[in-house]
Image (spheres, coloured by chain):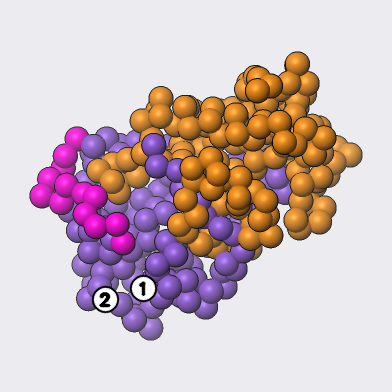
Chain colours: A orange, B purple
Amino acid sequence: MIETTIRAATRDDLAFIIALIEEDSVYGSTEDAANPQAPGYLAALAAIDADPNQMLLIATLDGEPVGTFQLTFTPGISRRGAWRCTVENVHVSATHRNKRIGEQMMAWAADQARARGCAFVQLTSNKQRTDAHRFYERIGFSKSHEGFKLKL
Amino acid sequence: MIETTIRAATRDDLAFIIALIEEDSVYGSTEDAANPQAPGYLAALAAIDADPNQMLLIATLDGEPVGTFQLTFTPGISRRGAWRCTVENVHVSATHRNKRIGEQMMAWAADQARARGCAFVQLTSNKQRTDAHRFYERIGFSKSHEGFKLKL
């Protein structure tokens, strides 16, 4: 298996992350891809970096960025005060599909979640992303929930 | 409409919250309902209180607790650095159903999310909770995503 390295994202990765979001979007363009250092992006990165319960990550292959994901660690009352790890914004570069990069990203997320005492890892995926759903079920996730969004 | 009041939960609400989780569970018992001040619950409440991006809430009717929910505010890169508000652990006491308490709880969550500049409110609901799904769609949520969980 090709080994990916997972590391924290920096502002130099914003152009890569935003290009991946655009490439992978099911909504059409939502980004300001020409301005990856726009104030909104920099503020979001700063907020993530300032919060010990947030991690924005980059998967690299031979030093080249090939994927990204974000982890949020949330304390809760249910399950005797269990923490959960929520994964957002999972994307792998289209030119690097079928190399088990996503699998390594999610294994890293699960290890990190275990190390922080989480009871489970959770994520949602747009109903249009049926390939992604097969992927998550293959690596052990259960499609147990409906995911609802309210646009403000 | 009967007006509920929404306020932050305290340790005195833990017995109520845990009883509601038990009453509403689709998993069978996961809680230590006899010990609502058990260290795991108190540690979770302390972690929520210490984190400005977490809110654990109680809905009351004439001063009596009737519902609970938790909000997590998460910064992200997508949508030009948009924040999102994730709702977890939404429960209304069985004896107070059909009084639009849940609707007021979710309206409060949306107001809070707007005030903090979030682009959307999101939540997941177990596929067995079909009444809840109808409720979320009725109040404007879109059932656009599949929700996946990996138990650790």
Q: Position of residue B100 (x, y in %)?
A: 38, 78
Q: Position of residue A1 (x, y in %)?
A: 65, 23
Element marked by disc 2: helix
Furthest residue to the left? B34
Q: Please tell me which residue is depicted at 59% across the width and 68% down the height of the picture.
A: B142
Is B32 placed above or below A50 here? below
Label 1: chain letter: B
Q: Is residue B36 magenta?
A: yes
Please state which amino acid type lies under the numbered disc 1.
Ile
Q: Is residue A83 left or right of residue A131?
A: left
Furthest residue to the top? A62
Q: Quadrant of the C terminus of chain A?
A: bottom right
* Most common secondary structure along the magenta stretch: loop
The number of numbered discs placed on residues in the rendered structure image is 2
Q: Is residue B79 magenta?
A: no
Is A20 placed above or below A1 here? below
Q: Which residues are drawn in magenta? A: B26-39
Residue located beneath label 2 in the image: B96
Residue located beneath label 1 in the image: B101
Q: Please tell me which residue is depicted at 57% across the width and 73% down the height of the picture.
A: B140
Closer-to-camera residue (B151/B97): B151
Is label 1 on the same chain as label 2? yes
Q: CB of mark 1 within 8 Å of CB of mark 2?
A: yes
Q: Is residue B83 left or right of residue B125?
A: right
Q: Position of residue B12 (x, y in %)?
A: 18, 50
Please state which amino acid type lies under the numbered disc 2.
His
Q: Residues within 10 Å of mark 1 (few under 14, many from 20)?
A: many
Q: Please tell me which residue is depicted at 16% across the width and 47% down the height of the picture.
A: B32
Q: Is residue B62 left or right of residue A122?
A: left
Element marked by disc 1: helix
- Separation (CA) of disc 1 from disc 2: 8 Å
